[in-house]
Amino acid sequence: MLPFGRMSPFLGRWFRSDRSDDAQRIAALEREASHLRDELAENRFLMNQWREELTRARAGFSNHIDDAVHDRVGHLLTELAPMLAAIAGLARDPGAWRDADMGDVAAWVERTSQVLRKYGVETMATPGASLPFDPAWHECVVGRANDGQTVVVRTPAYAYQGRVLVKAAVAAPPPARS
């Protein structure tokens, strides 16, 4: 048995080599950690570049959409302007309605409907039709109507992409007399 404090030559070599192996492993891990930090910094840099490119692309796409919407609205208004001018002329002169040719008025209404359909506006409910009252689509202009009560359509509703633009004017039947 060896006295305390003394080490066998074999054990001494083992401890010394283990320490040098640990130092080598630590150095290798430090190099790998440094490499990973560099790679992470590079990836963050690339991510920021891509984020900036995405922001610029979104802004360009948004501008493209805005331009397209403005073009469509401009075309719509250009096509509707003559009909609106004719109707405005009739509105300024109350006697003009009496003198107006109803065929012309019907033609204006039909042409306006065609232009609106061309741009995706849907006409809902035909004047004169009887249907159940729905406050989301109808405005009762004569009498009072409750949900589901049968009403008569006076003017159609207009919708665009499922959203109500103008509710249909409807009339409720007079209340039953007891």
Image: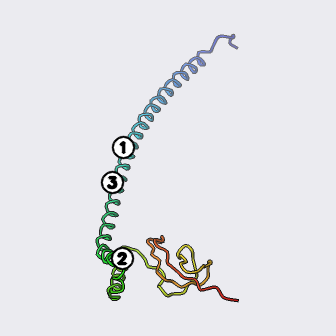
Q: Which residue is mark 1?
A: 49
Mark 2 → mark 1, Cα distance in angstroms: 59 Å
Q: Which mark is residue 60?
A: 3
Q: Residue at x 51, y 23 (%)?
A: 23
Give the percent coordinates (x, y) of residue 118.
35, 76
Task: State if disc 3 and disc 1 touch (CB < 8 Å).
Answer: no
**Residue under the image location 35 percent in, 52 percent down:** 59
What is the x, y in percent for residue 9?
59, 15
Q: Which residue is mark 2?
A: 91
Asked if the residues shown at circle 2 and circle 3 are in contact, with their CB atoms under 8 angstroms apart, the answer is no
Q: Position of residue 173 (x, y in %)?
A: 59, 86
In primary-sequence order, the first of circles 1 and 3 is 1
Q: CA distance from mark 2 to mark 3?
A: 43 Å
**How busy is the neighbourhood of tag 2: few (under 14 within 10 Å), some, or many (20 plus)?**
few
Amino acid identity at mark 1: Gln
- Mark nearer the N terminus (2 vs 3): 3
Q: Residues within 10 Å of mark 1 (few under 14, many from 20)?
A: few
Hey, what amino acid is under mark 2? Answer: Ala
Q: Secondary structure at mark 1?
A: helix
Mark number, residue 87: none
Q: Nearer the viewer, mark 1 or mark 3?
A: 3
First in sequence, mark 2 or 1: give its number: 1
Q: Amino acid at mark 3?
A: Gly
151 over 43 or under it: above or below: below
The secondary structure type at the circle numbered 3 is: helix
